[in-house]
Amino acid sequence: MGVRPRDDDRRDGLGGDGPRSSGHGADPCRDPAERSRAAEAIAEGMGRAKPGEVPGRLCEVAVRLLPVTGASASLRSDGVPVQLCASGDLAAYLSDIQATLGEGPCVEATETGRPVLARDLATGPDARRWPVYAQEATAVGVRAVYALPLGNDSVCVGTLDLYRDTPGTLTGPELHTARLIAGVMTVALMALPHGEEYDIQGGAPWLSGLAAEHDEVFQAVGMIMAQLGVGADEALARLRAHAFAHGRTAHDVARDVVTHRERFERDR
């Protein structure tokens, strides 16, 4: 989970609460000029990005184009979602919190394959839906979170998560732009050829490194099952609870379990 971002690490929100008028009843999300503007911004943001840079570049583009303060992307996992990239410390922290707790808009969007738009984590149904995550998010100044699935109608490979420090939802045009960014990120991830998943230095494997984190969680869950004599779900819950209680990420604790620096003891 790491250290919470400092107050001066946060950016001011760009948007207000509720939809904005498009004028004369026009819908900019259907306006070819508006679509072209968003597409040009995405293309410019990606530039000559190498495969490992694409998701991070798209998160930065999302922050520039939308009324959000941060963005992150995570890959789906049967255990703990693996963070792919984040636009800054705040977004990285919120992504880690969801993975560690196993709750939040990102987790729900992954499970349902549908966008989850949490307009106010401080009050109302969104605060009650994910009480612990909502408390952690609002404690660092995040009031709204929008999670969009990466993938298609048959498969969800992860999520694009957008964070905002003011309550409210995305307007139609803004949601269209967010979907466009998520679509480009999906294509970039699914079109990546096997054996070419290299990082921005062009050396170490990129997706392979993320897969290693995923494998560590599975190994740690298996070891905790043996140590405590419990099932897989209980072992994962124990790992998550231990990580949250000690202000760490689930991946960090899993790594310590696998390397025998951490051991879970049966309740006496």
Image (cartoon, rainbow, N blue to C red):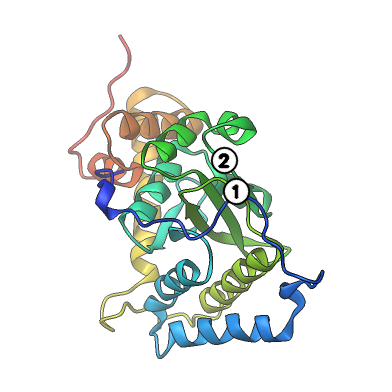
Relative image position of residue 60 (x, y in whole percent): 42, 71
Query: Mark 2 is on which residue type?
Result: Asp
The answer to which of 169 and 129 lies nearer the viewer is 169
Q: Is residue 39 left or right of residue 4?
A: right
Query: Mark 1 is on which residue type?
Result: Gly
The answer to which of 157 and 56 lies nearer the viewer is 56
Residue at 34%, 33% (x, y): give it. Answer: 244
Q: Secondary structure at mark 1?
A: loop
Residue at 64%, 32% (x, y): give it. Answer: 125
Disc 1 to disc 2: CB gap under 8 Å:
yes
Q: Is residue 224 above or below residue 93?
A: above
Where is mark 2, residue-wise? Answer: 120
Where is mark 1, residue-wise? Answer: 168
Query: Label 2: few (<14), some or many (≥20) within 10 Å?
Result: many
Residue 88, picture quadrant: bottom left
Q: Is residue 69 left or right of residue 36?
A: left
Looking at the figure, which quarter contains the C terminus?
top left
Q: Is residue 250 left or right of residue 179?
A: left
CA–CA distance in space, label 1 to label 2? 6 Å
Circle on res. 83? none
Give the farthest residue toward the bottom. Answer: 48
Q: Is residue 197 something one can see in this rendering?
A: no
Q: Is residue 5 above or below residue 162?
A: above
Relative image position of residue 228 (x, y in whole percent): 36, 23
Query: Label 1: few (<14), some or many (≥20) within 10 Å?
Result: many
First in residue order: circle 1 vs circle 2 = 2
Q: Secondary structure at mark 2?
A: loop
Relative image position of residue 40 (x, y in whole percent): 55, 87
Residue at 53%, 41% (x, y): give it. Answer: 104
